[in-house]
Image (spheres, rainbow, N blue to C red):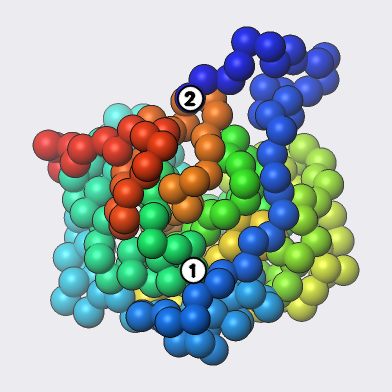
Amino acid sequence: MTTPSSFKIIPGQTELDQIPRDLRFHPAVNDHPRSLSAGQLSQFNRDGYIRGIRIFSPAEITSIRTYFDELLARTIAAGGDSYSISTAHAKYGRVFDILTDPRIVACVKDLLGENVVAWGSHFFCKMPHDGKTVAWHQDASYWPLTPSKAVTVWLAIDDADVENACMRFIAGSQHFGHLTYRPSDSSEHNVLNQTIENAEQYGTPVDDILQAGEISIHSDLLLHGSEANESDRRRCGLTLRYCAADVRAHMDWNQKGVIVSGSDPSGHWSNRRRPDTD
């Protein structure tokens, strides 16, 4: 779906700023969850996240880690870096398979409903002592999607803990809607480009400690970020993005979509096929 031609870019604003979006938290409504517990649904609605969900066995995540190591080596040899492997499901069949894994999808559809689209996949790999932070931000602030009925699944490829700069959440911050941010300063060494100041005023910081093969799931409006990795251990995670099928995508982002549960009656999402290459 392209941006309507009637949209005019106001000086100082971006195309994304011009898109009318419903950026309110939409709680999960599900009286009979199949994979998550009622307590997990309640926590998601209250705090904006759930964590520590085991998806892949030690053998499975070791295989995924070996695959990523090889992909990262090829990416760096081609001039990229450990953060530049984005929209990976559109290029690599192995990532497409992770994005569409029924065990992950089952958790997501307990939160979003039966009709679910997967549309994003991005490796966030903090190398030891790389000096990179991820400033406090909201995912929805970057996405031309409406309404705000989307979640991020964060798959731990390596163990993630405080020492190697695991992700951190501000519990309950999704209830404040879209928050004001400023462009990040170069001195922040931010992987992204937005910073929300004084995040702790919106809730309590929580460390998203995960073992390799586990996932956390958080609302697109939840404040989150991570410190620089000052340890001698790598911290790699694969972010997987999902939304309800009735979400509309501007700026042609619907072309990224894969229907992973139910259907898309409107035909808005492209439902791209698995890439042949790995």
Type of amino acid at the residue the image marks with label 2: Met
Which image quadrant for residue 19?
top right
Q: Which of 111/196 is in front?
A: 111
Q: Is residue 133 visible?
A: no
Distance between mark 1 and mark 2 Cα atoms: 25 Å
Type of amino acid at the residue the image marks with label 1: Leu
Identify the residue position indicated by label 2 in the image: 1
Q: Which of 51/135 is in front?
A: 51
As drawn, is 233 to the left or to the right of 131? left
In percent of width and height, residue 48 lies at 63, 70
Please tell me which residue is depicted at 81% across the width and 16% down the height of the picture: 10
Q: Which mark is residue 70?
A: none
Q: The C terminus appears in which quarter of the rendering?
A: top left
In percent of width and height, residue 240 lies at 41, 55
Please tell me which residue is depicted at 41% across the width and 37% down the height of the picture: 266
Please tell me which residue is depicted at 21% across the width and 38% down the height of the picture: 273
In percent of width and height, residue 76 lies at 33, 38
* SS class, disc 2: loop
As drawn, is 215 to the left or to the right of 88? right
Please tell me which residue is depicted at 21% across the width and 54% down the height of the picture: 97
Identify the residue position indicated by label 1 in the image: 111
In percent of width and height, residue 252 lies at 47, 25
Task: Verify CB contact (< 8 Å) between mark 1 and mark 2.
Answer: no
Which image quadrant for residue 125?
bottom left
Q: Which of 168/3 is in front?
A: 3
Dot placed on the residue nearer the N-terminal end, 1 or 2: 2
